Amino acid sequence: MQPTDATAADSGVEIDIQQVQKIYETRAGEEVRALECIDQHIAPGEFVSIVGPSGCGKSTLLAILAGLLEQDHGTVRINSQLVTRSHPRMAVVFQRDLLLKWRTVEDNILLPVEVKGWKISEYRPRARDLMKQVGLIDFARKYPDELSGGMRQRVAICRALVQQPGLLLMDEPFGALDALTREQMTIDLQRLWRRINNTVVFVTHSIDEAIFLSDRVLVMSPRPGKIDLDLKIDIPRPRRLAGRTSPQFLSYLESIRNTFERQGVLVEEDVS
């Protein structure tokens, strides 16, 4: 069904996660607990980041929210509806841009509109507006192999947002980018999200990135993954990169690092 004004992404979805657990079985028949007792409520329009050590289940939790993976226990509801498959108001951005090399930038952005059978003519103005917002309008007729890594990832984000998703799931979307491009992408994402105001669940290894972007940061424990810290980020928006040296920002940074130290994930050398 094509989105109407009533389902536009200016009102994000609500997510309820109750007692979610996920267990994998190895080839040897051993059980590996990936997630244990995840309980969370994410409000409509909230930007929530998930950080944690490698292998703690961040991507597993995101896949369950996306309806791409089934949990072994517990429930996930989006707008009170039980998640059993991909929600129609959801879009996903992965670490790899997954652009089709034979389609132009504009045609890549419009791909989900075409796949869902919506009228492309109605979404082309939105696609071009998104390209303008991220500095891609002059590259609309270019192909992916003519773009830098950062530009390709901007295309991937525009492709997700052109659908007007009430929920945007992002799995390490900037992980493959150089540091400078990553900072610009963080600024771009903040600007796009503030205009759309949808619900975002953002998985990242960068503590700074999580604090800068989020309303809340969820810190996961080593496997089996649990929520070890639920940290509300009360920094006025729009946020600027220079603000990362403020006492308030550094206080949030210290809280998350202290959690990782308590978990044994961060261990400083004893110089005494």
Image (cartoon, grey):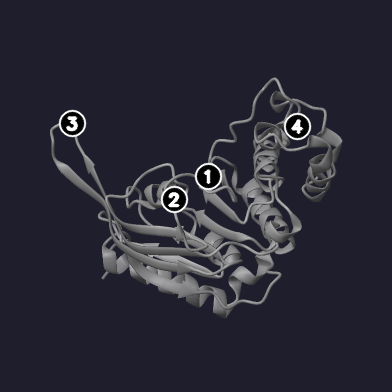
Between disc 2 and disc 4, whose residue precedes?
A: 2
Let me know if residue 256 appears in the view. Answer: yes
Using residue 250 as the reference point, say whether residue 262 is left or right of it.
left
Viewer-closest of 104 and 63? 63
How far, Cα to Cα, is label 3 from label 2?
24 Å
Disc 3 versus disc 4: distance between alpha carbons? 42 Å
Nearer-N-terminus badge (1/3): 3
SS for callout 4: helix
Q: Position of residue 159 (x, y in %)?
A: 68, 40
User: Dot 3: what SS?
Assistant: loop
Q: Nearer the viewer, residue 137 or 120?
A: 120
- The quadrant where residue 227 appears: bottom left
Indicate whether 28 appears above or below 67: above
Left or right of 181? Residue 224 is left
Q: Which residue is mark 4?
A: 105
Residue at mark 2: 62
